[in-house]
Image (cartoon, rainbow, N blue to C red):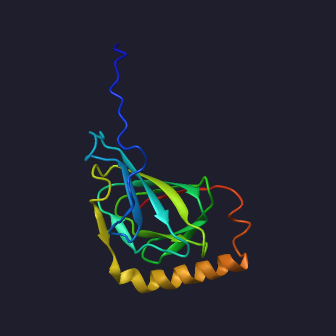
Amino acid sequence: MSTDLNLRVQTPGFPPYALGAQNQQLAPLVHSGVVNPRGLTCGLVKMNGGHHAVAHIHEHTPILVFVHTGMIASLVGDDMKPYLHAPGSVLWIAPGIVHLGVNLDPVDAAELLEARTDEAFNEDVVGRPDLDELAAERATDLQRRYARGDFDDQLMAPSVHIVDQ
């Protein structure tokens, strides 16, 4: 077995964030534009305080989300059912399941790492604007309840949520 490895530094730091189709600040890290990802890509997601994404699906690929910092809620399914995530939490969502992320904190940004099998990292996103109004109502309610301390017990430890059909 050869020990010769091709190691390179893609950037001197992380690439800049850009607004993605799901209204999230994304910084793709490993994707088909920089390497043959062999089916796995990843990038950073930054959610400013009080921000929520728009409802969307990843048409063909599952996603795995790791919450690095921040208190997050995911709204999932056509009924926008909430799941809460503290730092260290992991969320896996199957392809085709509508979802969005909500930063529960009104001030502090949240940072997440997302891994996907979308080789370009964000090409299979399909919006669900029919859920925008419901998503905004649910996000506002969750942020209000978070501010009151309603979720303190649930957010004391990381969680793992698997969303499949």
Most extreme residue toward the front, as rendered? 12
Q: Please name the residue shown 53% across and 81% down the image.
A: 138
> Residue 108 is drawn in which quadrant?
bottom right
Q: Position of residue 56 (x, y in %)?
A: 36, 70
106 above or below 117?
below
Q: Position of residue 109 (x, y in %)?
A: 56, 66
**Image quadrant containing the C terminus:** bottom left
Q: Is residue 121 left or right of residue 79?
A: left
39 above or below 60?
above
Q: Is residue 53 left or right of residue 119?
A: right
**Image quadrant containing the N terminus:** top left
Most extreme residue toward the top, as rendered? 1
Q: Position of residue 29 (x, y in %)?
A: 38, 48
Q: Please name the residue shown 43% across and 86% down the image.
A: 133
Query: Total number of numbered labels?
Result: 0
Q: Is residue 152 left or right of residue 83?
A: right
2 above or below 78?
above
Q: Please name the residue shown 50% across and 57% down the image.
A: 112
> Residue 8 is drawn in which quadrant?
top left
Q: Which of 86/29 is in front? A: 29
Q: Please name the residue shown 40% across and 74% down the image.
A: 55
Q: Which of 107/54 is in front? A: 107
